[in-house]
Image: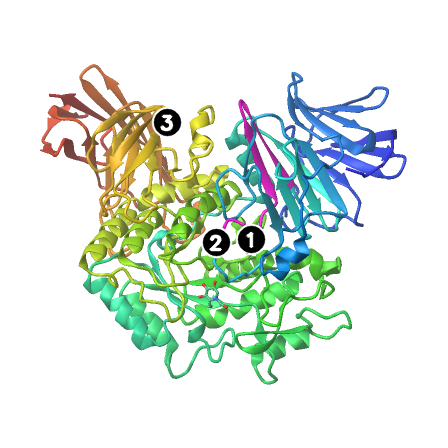
């Protein structure tokens, strides 16, 4: 780094903050908590309110500050921070172990020989060398380090050796490994090495770059074209602590309505009520569960947002109501581009109130999208956000249940929006170069807040573009993938890194968006899709039908079976979302989240955990009829056969088309619902508990599934504990919190891998049945103790 700020010539402490005067500039090191440190240098001007960290997060932290000859030594009760000449900043544990250190040498990129120009002439693409950023940070790579996070990127789980960019981009060609940027920018990096994990969150929304030991093995490089040096160091040493720290700053995904975890069917575009009804009826006739049908852009009147087509979608309200009777919710797409047309109420209202982005001459900036010429709402203006949020009344009044935000990178058919387009930014006027990456974020915030005010229910929003912190407002999907096996494979690390970047409520277009899907690919994609929190099948216009029945009887049966499994697992997924709102941990997890000491898990690109109890090893290759599954420490039950395996070893699993390998950890108690066609079809007053004998404890959460009343305590909690004692399995059941009026009547216990001689409930012998290596028992929900005596 060539930034020469000189020596430290003075400092003073203001509460949590140490202001450090250099010969050339003043820097700030501030403890947000004892484990989270903000490092700030005003390279680009005034410090504006962050769009990612929206609330005051500082707690009072005791700082010990000391100056030696050159350096300033700052200590919290968790960390020691050494700040030196030229604002080099190093982090140590309280007992002096290095965590993360600035790299002191010069940048030393590897040499590229030959001519980029000639290569481009021939039609190849040259790789951009990243230079000349206003903001630059180099951190030492300390030995065997692994890098994760950074939101949505192609490639592998571990990002070491690669370069990525933060610049929200809608590039419709097939996403391949060499892509450095996609729709989402999450400048959060998680670093893992033996016994240590830490995070760096760079809160700068300008176009920025991460080079993770690609340029040189010895350092990682972060650069931003403009703005300030402004990052948060987040101490672990566990990955879970780092994620909790990042969630503390940027927020967590709020618990969604329960139906939002159901299966969702989309298509660009179901273009009339007639076609929508055909699809809806087929789901019910074929008994394939489905909760949501999406209306893509063709529902609109000539792509005017907040309108609908009066012929193909005549009597909109009645159509939505009819679907509701059948148990379907309707989610409609809303793009940011507002058709530039006098007399169109949205355009006129926004224009009158000055709610559009302006070009440098102060005239509403125009680009072209679906409706033709459009103007763009300025979502950085809170008044514009409220106006936009309120516009959704038109749709919610018709019964629309959720909103899908697209094209909000923002995209424009006439090329990128110029850097100097002006945003109001609530009193901190800013240009597009700074606001581009937060445009989608602020749009989904407007949508979330609008839906929340209009419906009083937990909003369901999907967005394509986003920034750090969008998890507070929206779910995300990974944009325009293809019906390619490579894209199925890529989905696993992509969803895992999104999950590690705060965006727990994520999913892919199941079956693939572009290109034609085929039966085998569909079957495998559904098998993966049932585990992603957002579970939506979507495909492009002019591609082959992609509904679950479009590929013949065998694939249809597989889809039905797996979508049913998703619906059985709904209470487990819902529990995970509820926990995630509190602790910031994602639903989908790379294995190292729960097995951090096991280096075998650091580069598993084709396996994941759903919560802490369920391990999935999907099939990601055409024709693959067996695969290796790595089981981490513990004992594991094959979900399909009940067979038990010892962990810390790879095993081989046969994978005929109908089998996706799933393993349940011994000691797990997984809540299940009875199969149903949609959420709410059955009252689910009997909860199934799928028990895998061992030692374990599980907390189950229950509420109304829709409103915010849970935030006022209207929920129930149940604690289920199990342990083995000699030839007995003991289950203790307890309702530990009773705040929600409805409760379960019975628990249906499914005890796997056991044959029982007798079962006792609260000391009394009760009847049970035995089925395929499982004990089945129904007990009243008030039961406290169940003893299963092994045969
Ligand atoms: O220019 O609304 O990624 O899911 O179907 C394409 C039409 C616009 C891109 C989205 C895709 C959606 C499509 N949209």
Report x, y in % for residue 492: 42, 44
Q: How many residues crowd around disc 2 within 10 Å: few (fewer than 14), some, or many (20 or more)?
A: many
Q: How many residues crowd around disc 1 within 10 Å: few (fewer than 14), some, or many (20 or more)?
A: many
Q: Is residue 202 magenta?
A: no
Considering the numbered disc 3 on the image, is that residue within a helix, a strand or a loop? Answer: loop
Up-down relation of residue 77 to residue 157 (above or below): above
- Quadrant containing the C terminus is top left
Q: Is residue 193 magenta?
A: yes
- Quadrant containing the N terminus is top right
Label located before the other in sequence (1 or 3): 1
Specify whether tag 2 is near ligand 1 (CB below 8 Å): no
Up-down relation of residue 545 to residue 70 (above or below): below
Question: Which residue, given by chain and number where applicable, does mark 3 sit on?
Answer: 632
Res. 476 mark: 2
Quarter location, residue 283: bottom left
- CA gap, disc 1 to disc 2? 9 Å
Contact between labelled residues 3 and 1, with CB atoms less than 8 Å apart: no
Considering the numbered disc 1 on the image, is that residue within a helix, a strand or a loop? Answer: strand
Q: Which residues are magenta?
A: 175-201
Up-down relation of residue 682 to residue 775 (above or below): below
Residue that appears at 48% across and 80% down = 302
Q: Is residue 702 visible?
A: no
Report x, y in % for residue 311: 38, 84
Contact between labelled residues 2 and 3, with CB atoms less than 8 Å apart: no
Res. 184 mark: 1
Res. 534 mark: none
Q: As rendered, which of 624 and 738 lies closer to the eye?
A: 624
Residue that appears at 66% across and 60% down = 380
Query: For the residues carrying marks 1 and 2, which lies nearer the camera in this image?
Result: 1
Report x, y in % for residue 121: 63, 61
Query: For the residues carrying marks 3 and 2, which lies nearer the camera in this image?
Result: 3
Contact between labelled residues 2 and 1, with CB atoms less than 8 Å apart: yes
């Amino acid at each position: 780094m060539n930034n020469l700020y000189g020596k430290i010539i003075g400092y003073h402490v203001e509460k949590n903050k140490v202001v450090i005067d250099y010969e050339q500039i003043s820097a700030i090191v501030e403890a947000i908590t004892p484990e989270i440190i903000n490092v700030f240098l005003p390279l680009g001007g005034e410090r504006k309110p962050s769009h990612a960290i929206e609330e005051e997060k500082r707690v009072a932290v005791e700082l010990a500050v000391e100056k030696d000859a050159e350096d300033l030594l700052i200590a919290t009760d968790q960390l020691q921070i050494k700040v030196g000449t030229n604002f080099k900043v190093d982090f140590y544990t309280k007992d002096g172990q290095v965590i993360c250190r600035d790299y002191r040498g010069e940048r030393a990129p590897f040499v590229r020989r030959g001519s980029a120009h000639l290569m481009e002439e021939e039609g190849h693409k040259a790789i951009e060398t990243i230079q000349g950023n206003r903001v630059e940070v180099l951190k030492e790579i300390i030995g065997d380090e692994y890098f994760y996070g950074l939101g949505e990127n192609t490639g592998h789980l571990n990002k070491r050796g690669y370069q990525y960019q933060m610049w929200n981009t809608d590039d419709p060609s097939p996403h391949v490994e060499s892509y450095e940027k996609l729709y989402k920018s999450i400048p959060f990096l998680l670093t893992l090495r033996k016994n240590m994990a830490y995070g760096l969150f760079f809160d700068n929304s300008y176009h920025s770059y991460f080079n993770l030991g690609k340029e040189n093995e010895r350092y990682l490089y972060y650069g931003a074209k403009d703005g300030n040096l402004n990052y948060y160091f987040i101490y672990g040493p566990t990955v879970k602590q780092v994620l909790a720290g990042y969630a503390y700053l940027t927020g967590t995904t709020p618990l969604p309505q329960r139906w939002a975890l159901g299966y969702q069917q989309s298509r660009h575009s179901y273009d009339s009520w007639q076609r929508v009804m055909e699809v809806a009826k087929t789901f019910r006739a074929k008994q394939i569960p489905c909760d949501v049908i999406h209306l893509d852009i063709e529902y609109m009147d000539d792509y005017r947002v907040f309108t609908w087509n009066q012929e193909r979608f005549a009597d909109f309200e009645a159509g939505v109501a009819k679907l509701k009777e059948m148990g379907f919710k309707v989610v409609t797409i809303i793009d940011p581009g507002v058709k530039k047309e006098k007399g169109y109420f949205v355009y006129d209202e926004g224009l009158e109130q000055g709610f559009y982005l302006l070009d440098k001459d102060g005239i509403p900036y125009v680009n072209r999208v679906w409706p033709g010429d459009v103007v763009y709402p300025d979502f950085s203006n809170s008044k514009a956000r409220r106006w936009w949020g309120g516009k959704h009344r038109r749709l919610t009044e018709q019964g629309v249940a959720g909103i899908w935000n697209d094209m909000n990178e923002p995209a424009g058919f006439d090329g990128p929006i110029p850097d100097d387009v002006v945003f109001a930014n609530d009193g901190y006027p800013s240009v597009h170069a700074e606001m581009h990456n937060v445009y989608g974020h602020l749009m989904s915030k407007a949508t979330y807040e609008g839906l929340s005010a209009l419906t009083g229910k937990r909003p369901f929003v999907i967005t394509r573009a986003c920034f750090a912190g969008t998890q507070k407002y929206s779910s995300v999907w990974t944009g325009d993938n293809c019906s390619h096996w490579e894209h199925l494979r890529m989905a696993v690390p992509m969803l895992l890194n999104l999950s590690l970047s705060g965006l727990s409520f994520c999913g892919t277009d199941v079956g693939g968006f572009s290109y034609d899907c085929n039966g085998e690919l569909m079957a495998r994609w559904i098998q993966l899709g049932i585990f992603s929190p957002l579970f939506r099948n979507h495909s492009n216009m002019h591609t082959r039908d992609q509904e679950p029945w479009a590929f013949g009887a065998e694939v249809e049966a597989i889809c039905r079976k797996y979508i049913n499994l998703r619906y059985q697992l709904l209470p487990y997924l819902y529990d995970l979302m509820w926990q995630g709102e509190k602790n910031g941990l994602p639903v989908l997890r790379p294995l190292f989240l729960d097995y951090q000491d096991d280096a075998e898990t650091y580069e598993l690109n084709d396996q994941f955990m759903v919560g802490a109890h369920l391990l999935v090893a999907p099939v990601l290759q055409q024709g693959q009829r067996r695969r290796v599954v790595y089981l981490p420490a513990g004992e594991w039950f094959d979900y399909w056969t009940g067979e038990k395996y010892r962990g810390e070893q790879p095993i081989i699993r046969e994978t005929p088309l109908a089998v996706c390998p799933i393993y349940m950890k011994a000691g797990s108690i997984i809540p299940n619902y009875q199969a149903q066609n949609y959420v709410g079809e059955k009252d689910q007053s009997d909860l199934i508990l799928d028990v895998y004998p061992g030692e374990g404890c599980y907390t189950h959460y229950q509420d109304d599934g829709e409103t915010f009343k849970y935030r006022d305590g209207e929920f129930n909690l149940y604690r289920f504990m199990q342990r083995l004692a000699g030839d007995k399995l003991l289950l203790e059941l307890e309702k530990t919190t009773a705040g929600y009026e409805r409760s379960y009547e019975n628990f249906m216990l499914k005890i796997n891998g056991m044959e029982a001689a007798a079962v006792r409930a609260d000391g009394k012998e009760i009847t049970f049945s035995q089925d395929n290596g499982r004990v089945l028992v129904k007990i009243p929900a008030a039961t406290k103790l169940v003893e299963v005596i092994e045969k």
